[in-house]
Amino acid sequence: MFNKPYIDLDEWRDTPVRHRYVHGGFAGTGTRFSFYFPAKEQYQGRFFQYVTPFPDDENLSQGAKGEEDKIGFSISSGAYFIETNGGGRVDFGRPGIPSDPLIGAYRANAASAHFSRTVAVQMYGSHRTYGYCFGGSGGAYRTIGGIENTEGVWDGAVPYVLGSPMAIPNVFSVRMHAMRILNDKLPQIIDAMDAGGSGDMYMGLNEEEKQALAEVTRMGFPPQSWFGYKTMGIHGFIALYQGMKMADRKYFDDFWTVKGYLGANPTASLLNARLQKTSKIKLAIPIDEAVKLGIKEPISEGERGSADLAWKSIGGTAGAMPVAFQLEDVLPAVHFLGGDLIIKSGAAAGKSIQLASVFGDKVVFGPVDPTVLAQIKVGDEVFVDNSNFLAVQTYHRHQVPGKEYQVWDQFRDAAGNPLYPQRPMLLGPLFTRGAAGVLPTGKFKGKMILLCSLWDREAFAWQGDFYRETVKANLGDKTDDVFRLWYTDRALHGDLSKQEDPTRTVSYLGVLQQALRDLSAWVEKGGLPPASTQYKIEDGQVIVPAKAQDRKGIQPVVQLQVNGKKRADVAVGQKVTFTANVELAPNSGKLVSADWDFEGGGTFPVSSKIKNDKLHLKTRYTFLKPGTYFPTLRIAVQREGSAETAFARIQNLDRVRVVVK
């Protein structure tokens, strides 16, 4: 299948840095690749290959800047960079089973990596080319699937924010359950867990709320991450829902009718959250109008182009494809996390569209099949129903796996038997195979550094340990010869430099970049990378030591106090003293920045001068207006001690509470 590679574009480019760009594919396939080669004097005999969360676009990394610039980072690390479309972009509006799932899982990536070596030899002369793949989330599944099931392609891998074979859809279902029940109480939960808070997140909750919070926490959701509840939505589940319906359609009826399911004996909160409403379509709303109405975020030019192409292919006009409908009726106000728009009349009668959100009389689509959309007309009768999305919220209770998954112990009785009726099959492994082609075995040739985030809402942190235990089952005492697991504190799931709230979380991109550099040195020169993070797991939560020397890994630790405590109550105009102790992990580099944000703007406008590796910082500040503030100190270390580079800067932060009266 991949025996006829071709190149259709070969040119030198100067952005983001000087490099030779090679684009091509394999005849008779949908696979496309992009290679980015440095000049000969910069090349050190290796490549870094990015594995996307799902088969996507081979040019995704173009245009990135600063810390997010994978091309510039690779070339600065003596590597050429590879990116592919994984055999063809996934259309979540038209779910289906590919003829060969291994193509998207790893075969397209492996074939591209193999051919890149041929081009590298032509450019640089005969040499041994070392190869390293890296990918996050679904890309972590695909990265592991690749290195576990190929030989001679990659010498090492850096998967990051990895889920377990039981992650999908369960990490989303339990989170959605908690979001529905706790929605009004999340502000007080967030406050309790924040700097200077009470620390008791259960205070003031009723019994149903306490149970929901305990359930999601024991499953692994990090309580500190609830701060993003208004914007985090249902994340990847929006793309998984159709596949779940295909795999277990009967569940959505059983939930409401069969004893042992929550819907068959519903709580008042569940009934109050159910939305079922018949109406008619009044108006189709395209993307530009939806953005003006504030019901959709703007989309990229690439997304717009793809949507226009799909719409025009079935006779539509560019820019006119609806992304929402206005209905004749205002919908009841419920905490809506998703639903279905079922078409009751017209050419599309009997079909449905997935809904992402509702706003009064407007319904906004999730992933949608344009051919279905084209059949729906103004005046058609529709039925808005969120019953399935309510049913999903306790699906994890009916997916109890083997005892190796200890977070499910809360759903077993004393004898180890499930407390709730179980579905005929476990969907987690099915979805994992869909991403990686096979289930992870922990058996691979080469070396690996696995990265996970302690505040990850989508890939709960314990799942990194689950894969580590899978590796240890094969290698035993030799695990550390080829494997590391590094946890990043205060980091979320997304591999973005810009943070949702920069005064609470940090990017893990610097950790990822240093891991790739350490991995290549480990493989090529035998240089041992820093030790794995030390941790313990209690009730689904990964807990790391307070001190960097004990924690290990590569992330520094900062401990900030205000007037000697985590909270200070002061008067307007009163000077406040901030002190911080910074601790570096063993062999992790030098402190290169220490930036302060006193009033919560997220801009960190004040910087402390770094002198002679001084790790104790002190400053003073005066607040001129009353209010509650969370002053934050963000630090960064860099292995070579470079304060100028954007790459491999390992961050952490701490914050305190100041109440000004």
Image (cartoon, rainbow, N blue to C red):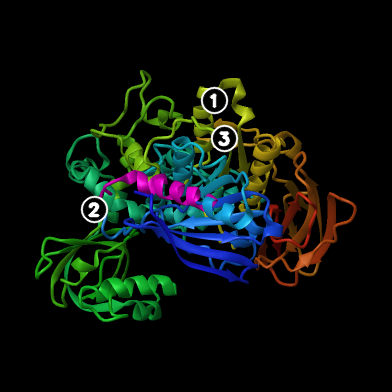
Count the marks.
3
> Toward the viewer: 211 or 530?
530
Q: Is residue 104 magenta?
A: yes
Calculate the distance from the C-alpha at mark 1 to the C-alpha at mark 3: 15 Å
Q: Is residue 450 above or below residue 279?
A: above
User: Which residue does the numbered mark 1 point to in the structure image?
Assistant: 472
Q: Earlier in the sequence, mark 2 or mark 3?
A: 2
The reply to whether discs 2 and 3 touch (Cβ–Cβ < 8 Å) is no
> Toward the viewer: 527 or 543?
527
User: Which residue does the numbered mark 3 point to in the structure image?
Assistant: 446
Q: Residue at x 77, y 40 (%)?
A: 587
Calculate the distance from the C-alpha at mark 2 to the C-alpha at mark 1: 43 Å
User: Which residue does the numbered mark 2 point to in the structure image?
Assistant: 387
> Toward the viewer: 609 or 54?
54
Q: Earlier in the sequence, mark 2 or mark 1?
A: 2
Q: Where residue 547 sits: x, y (%)?
A: 74, 38
Q: What is the quadrant of residue 6 in the picture?
A: bottom left
Q: Residues within 10 Å of mark 3 (few under 14, many from 20)?
A: some
Between disc 2 and disc 1, the foreground one is 1
Q: Residue at x 49, y 57 (%)?
A: 83
